[in-house]
Image (cartoon, grey):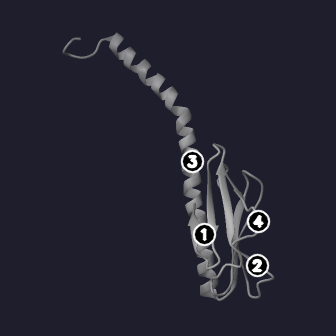
Amino acid sequence: MDSRGFTLAETLTGVVLAIVLAGIATPRLSHLAADYRLAVFSRQLAFEITRTRAQAIAQHRYARLRIAGYPGTQQYWVETSTDGVAYTKQGDPASIPASVYAALPGGVFPTFDRQGFAAYEVDILLSNQNGRSKTVHVNRIGRVTVL
């Protein structure tokens, strides 16, 4: 090696090695990105459910968070009611990331009464294409946790 720099052969070897390492790392990065989106959305959904509970208490109304749609096009929104029977949509629906699928095994949405108590215990299962999953759990007193 010359003290003034690298030879062409050394430079090409370094470039080829960098390309090979990038090729190996790229598929793993896409898995990490999908897992990151799942983790971020699970915390976002937990926050939205907590905010829905706070809205029920502040407005002294019933409130629930609805989830609807097919995988890749799912959305969620908040609905409120004065009697707990007839609900009205509040605001615009928000989209669930296309790489995340939300399922409600019991078919029950997180619903809160005027004091902020949940009508039912609810588990929302969130999963991605890597087979990873998170559960957003709402207990009867309205506490929301991500498992």
Type of amino acid under label 1? Glu
Residue bearing mark 3: 35
Q: Residue at x 71, y 79 (%)?
A: 119
Q: Is residue 110 above or below residue 81?
A: above
Quarter residue 143 falls in: bottom right
For the N terminus, the image quarter is: top left
Residue 16, image x, y percentages: 44, 18
Looking at marks 2 and 3 on the same chain, the residue that comes earlier in the sequence is marked by: 3
Looking at marks 1 and 4 on the same chain, the residue that comes earlier in the sequence is marked by: 1
Q: Are marks 1 and 4 in contact (CB under 8 Å)?
A: no
Type of amino acid under label 3? Asp
Type of amino acid under label 4? Gly
Q: How busy is the neighbourhood of tag 1: few (under 14 within 10 Å), some, or many (20 plus)?
A: some
Residue bearing mark 4: 106
Q: Is residue 126 above or below residue 88?
A: above
Looking at marks 2 and 4 on the same chain, the residue that comes earlier in the sequence is marked by: 2
Q: How busy is the neighbourhood of tag 4: few (under 14 within 10 Å), some, or many (20 plus)?
A: few
Type of amino acid under label 2? Thr
Looking at marks 1 and 2 on the same chain, the residue that comes earlier in the sequence is marked by: 1
Residue bearing mark 2: 88
Cα separation, mark 3 vs mark 4, equals 25 Å
Q: Residue at x 42, y 20 (%)?
A: 17
Cα separation, mark 2 vs mark 4, equals 22 Å
Q: Is residue 94 visible?
A: no
* SS of the residue under disc 3: helix
Cα separation, mark 2 vs mark 3, equals 34 Å
Looking at marks 3 and 1 on the same chain, the residue that comes earlier in the sequence is marked by: 3
Q: In terms of depth relative to the viewer, which is nearer, 80 or 6?
A: 80
Q: Which mark is residue 48?
A: 1
Q: In terms of depth relative to the viewer, which is nearer, 36 or 90?
A: 36
Cα separation, mark 1 vs mark 4, equals 20 Å
